[in-house]
Image (tube, helix red, strand yellow):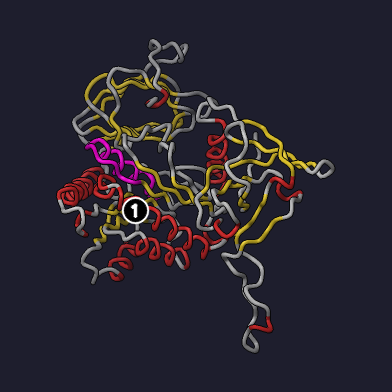
Amino acid sequence: MAYGGASVAPAGAAGGSTTIRQVKLDKECELRVEVGPDAPLRLRLSSGTGEIFGTEIPPGIWLTYPPRLKFAIFSWYGATIEMDGSTETDYTADETPMISYVNVHAVVDARRTRAKDAPSDSDTSQGPRVIVVGPSDSGKSTLSRMLLSWAAKQGWKPTFVDLDIGQGSITIPGCIAATPVELPIDPVEGIPFEMPLVYFHGHATPSANADLYKVLVKELAQTLERQFTGNLESRASGMVINTMGWIEGVGYELLLHAIDTLNVTVVLVLGQEKLWSMLRDVYKNKVNVDVVKLQKSGGVVSRNAKVRQKSRAYRIREYFYGLANDLSPHSSVANFSDLSIYRIGGGPQAPRSALPIGAEPSADPTRLIPVTVNQDLLHLVLAVSFATEPAEIISSNVAGFIWITDINFDSKKITYLAPSAGSLPGRYLIMGSLTWYEP
């Protein structure tokens, strides 16, 4: 694992005339950093111990962090940090919620141990299923990463479930996904996705098709249950579930649906008293569901819609080109007739003649609509389904994604970018509203 883009170049080699700065961290304090926009930052732990989002920093090695990355180094016992390069901001903080976070980890870890020691055919062999909820920019993704990294450090293999389709921590935005986490998470490279289980919603917000979102969460949950049945280690390790920041109205209903569908046992509420109170009332009579209120970190940065949109575009680019432009995507050409493109949702559910008098037909959120190749497909990101027939599209996870770069209506050919050369894993493609324009 290339921790932080690890580099062993001598100090000052990348920074030119940049002065190396030294920061001393006291016990249970953290250094909050936003790397400058134009150049990477080199950083070294010269003494003591420190961690980034639950992952320990190796001592004495210069590590490189890309422009605009935001992170915090926390030290339990004190540390000295050296930095070579410019930062947008960096400051130390002595008030953090880390003690409460690690206490949650300790409780969850004890439940994993009990699950591992329980008879394999008993309900108690199921490890903790932790869901992290809260408004946008409350630190949900960061806390999820901490809990996963701490668990992996203890030798567990928890399953990370990402329900935040607007952000995409495991794969590109527009998806719900799950993947086992076996090692502490690299703060730059993020969640490993060698073998993720991915379902494509196709939009940056569930509001575009909330019913489809529910269906996909259910499909994901059923697949994970089958996997846990055959893998006692993963079952005992449990889940950590990250959620979106939409917590009102339909968003709140989707949150309750996810908690119930994934059989959550621990609900961690970040940064909002009202949400904690509402969920506590809903689950107060369920003895196997604990609702816990946690303080959000003061280092959490609020993002506006433009920043979120840029982040989504960056995640899509990273999928095709890699974090450091180290991947070589392949441009391919296919005949219109070689591909079958569908979108999910839309169209009348039933004709007026079949409805009660006065009733209006409504859209069917899970109806498959064949898509004729047209100019609107240009610059769309499409999912490649594992389905072998159209009826399997909604219940099937996806193999990956392609990006439409050109459409020639004279020759009836589509040019697309794929992560690798060769034919696609399937002919069925799913269309949403996810677009990308390469810079």
- What residue lies at 20% left-to-right and 46% top-to-bottom? 109
Does the stretch in magenta take in 147? Answer: yes
Q: Which residues are magenta?
A: 138-159
Above or below, comparing residue 149 to residue 217 in the picture:
above
Report the residue that reaches farthest toward the right: 410
The residue that mark 1 highlights is: 132
The quadrant of the rendering that contains the N terminus is top left
Q: Name the spot of residue 191 as percent of width and height, x first.
A: 40, 38
- Front in this rendered view, residue 217 or 103: 217
- What residue lies at 38% left-to-right and 65% top-to-bottom? 256
Q: Name the spot of residue 153 as percent of width and height, x first.
A: 25, 35
Mark 1 residue crowding within 10 angstroms, few (<14) / some (14–19) / many (20+): many
Secondary structure under badge 1? strand
The quadrant of the rendering that contains the C terminus is top right
Give, as a three-letter code, the residue at label 1.
Val
- What residue lies at 26% left-to-right and 61% top-to-bottom? 291
Q: In the rendered image, which quarter is residue 2 located in? A: top left
Q: Name the spot of residue 357 as percent of width and height, x first.
A: 65, 89
